[in-house]
Amino acid sequence: MKRLRWQLITIFLTGLVVGILLLTDSSTGPIQVFESHPATGGIYREGLIGEIQRLNPLLSWYNDVDDDICRLIFSSLVTYDTRGNPVGDLAIDWGISIDGMTYNFAINPDAQWHDGQPVTADDVIFTYELLKTGKGYVPDDVLNFWNSVKINPVETKSLQFVLDEAFSPFLDYLNVGILPRHIYGGMSFEEMVDSKINIQPIGSGPFRLKELVQENGKITGVTVENNSAYYGKKPYLDEIEFTYFSDSALAYQAYQQGLIDGISYVSGDILTRALGDEDMNLYTARRPVLSMVFFNLDNRQVEFLQSKGVRNALMTGLNRERIINQILSGQAIIANSPILYGNWAYTAEGAVPEYNADKAIEMLIKEGFVIASEQERVRTKEITSVDGNTERKALSFTMVYPDDDLHRKVAESIQQDWGKINVLLNLEAVSYDDLVNHVLPDREYEAALVDLNLSVYPDPDPYPFWDQTQISSGQNYTQWNNRTTSQYLETARVELDRGERARLYKNFQILFMEELPALPLYNPVYNYPVSQKVSGVSIGPIYKPSDRFLNIRDWYMVSRSSVVE
């Protein structure tokens, strides 16, 4: 210890002498530190998986690669941040009436179209009135909603929406690209569908169309350029070049050849190679999909599923991590709520049972389900009927699942887990169309493996799936009849205060995880590979693939240095 102390003293004295010499040496100037800053310039090149159809926000609902480019070219009245909170885009301000039925918006006075014309309230009104006539091209729920809304002009740069009843998620419905009336005016929706204007878009977004790349009469690429007249924060990138590919493997080959800098979608067959590419950053985000096991709580053939204890035991006996790791190759996150992870309304405070087969068995025994004899492999429970007769009811039921390889493997994994706790799960494959259009709406099932697609709108609004008013004719397919949670949901969708809505949804989620009318399994993830040459990229939970461009104005490929004294 003495030797160590002397070494420390020696080092200290040496450093002191060197420091004094440096201070007294007039030939040595101040130490300069250089700091890098993003600068304007650079061309980002991305491979899109798919084909161009129409660069029109009213016609891109079902084609992600069209929506990707529309997201850059067109502005919406309101957009949202990575947590799903509404953020003004064309709208610089808005006000809501006390009854929650009237919304007034002011449009950015500097907003103009790419051809120099000003963006006005008439453009916004024109877009939504045109949308109302888009039967067959616009989703039915969107169409039905907008046909119940009245839109009134106020001034050149302001307008008003009037709802027939209060509806808190309304702001999310304003995330639609606005069209210029002076370009599209006079066209019917059907005429617009076939118009050449759809490949010559004029928008008001941060990028504008520069050129279409064609080979043998087919559009193979699109280039957009920085809109110098953009009313908001200007992008750093000069241009973005998009090239279309039929699959991820071809796009990845182009990346390896240095032809592109990013790929819009990574399929499972190239994921391992992308993960091992040292020159590539792989950004991962939660997709807006919630995989669940639905229980039909009003099916008399499986009355035992009405027991909260049985449902909790089934959840406890379900190894979700194995499903994710072995079947999904780790490309999902465990879902612990009926609201998507990362959303402003999400809470993790619900009691989530961890996988424990032994504990699940104890819970089933507590519910009266036992192995009555050594010959039996399925748990049974003695039940006395109204007439006094007794019989043993087996803990056995059937789960339908979409007829594809992935869902078959997930269903078989669930079957194996529940077999370990002596629950007999029969499996029945059905087509996706039959599941969506007949099995669930007709409530003709005992249990069902489903994927809830919660895309497009970040506002969670769980009302359609879980409110008791939706049991008979709505989408409450589990027929969960809980008045307390329904009151939370009904109040939340008319409450204007975001903090109060979050509190109501928190209470709903806690009760949901206690009752478990359905078992949340996982949220799949979206992988987005981008070259390390591109900086400033950030991706949060997404509600559609084009959300990867939420912070596109912060991306840069050129930097400048400054001296920090």
Image (cartoon, rainbow, N blue to C red):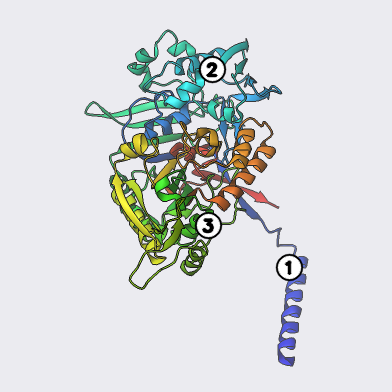
- Dot 2 surroundings within 10 Å: few (below 14), some, or many (20 or more)? many
**Quarter of the picture holding the N terminus:** bottom right
Amino acid type at circle 2 is Val
Instruction: State the residue in front, 382 or 153.
Output: 382
Question: What's the distance in space between the residues labelled 3 and 2, CA to CA?
Answer: 52 Å
Q: Residue at x 57, y 38 (%)?
A: 84
Report the mark closest to the observer, 1 or 2: 2
Q: Residue at x 42, y 15 (%)?
A: 133
Give the number of the disc on residue 124.
2
The quadrant in which residue 19 appears is: bottom right
Q: Residue 256: horizontal and vertical position, in percent?
A: 32, 51
Amino acid type at circle 3 is Gly
Asked whether, in this view, residue 273 is left or right of residue 34, the answer is: left
Nearest to N terminus: mark 1 or mark 3: 1
Amino acid type at circle 1 is Leu
Give the number of the disc on residue 368.
none
Give the number of the disc on residue 309.
3
Instruction: State the residue in front, 530 or 445.
Output: 445
Residue lying at the far left of the rendered structure: 216
Camera sees residue 292: no
497 lies above or below 323: above
Asked whether, in this view, residue 411 is left or right of residue 520, the answer is: left
Q: Residue 411: horizontal and vertical position, in percent?
A: 35, 54
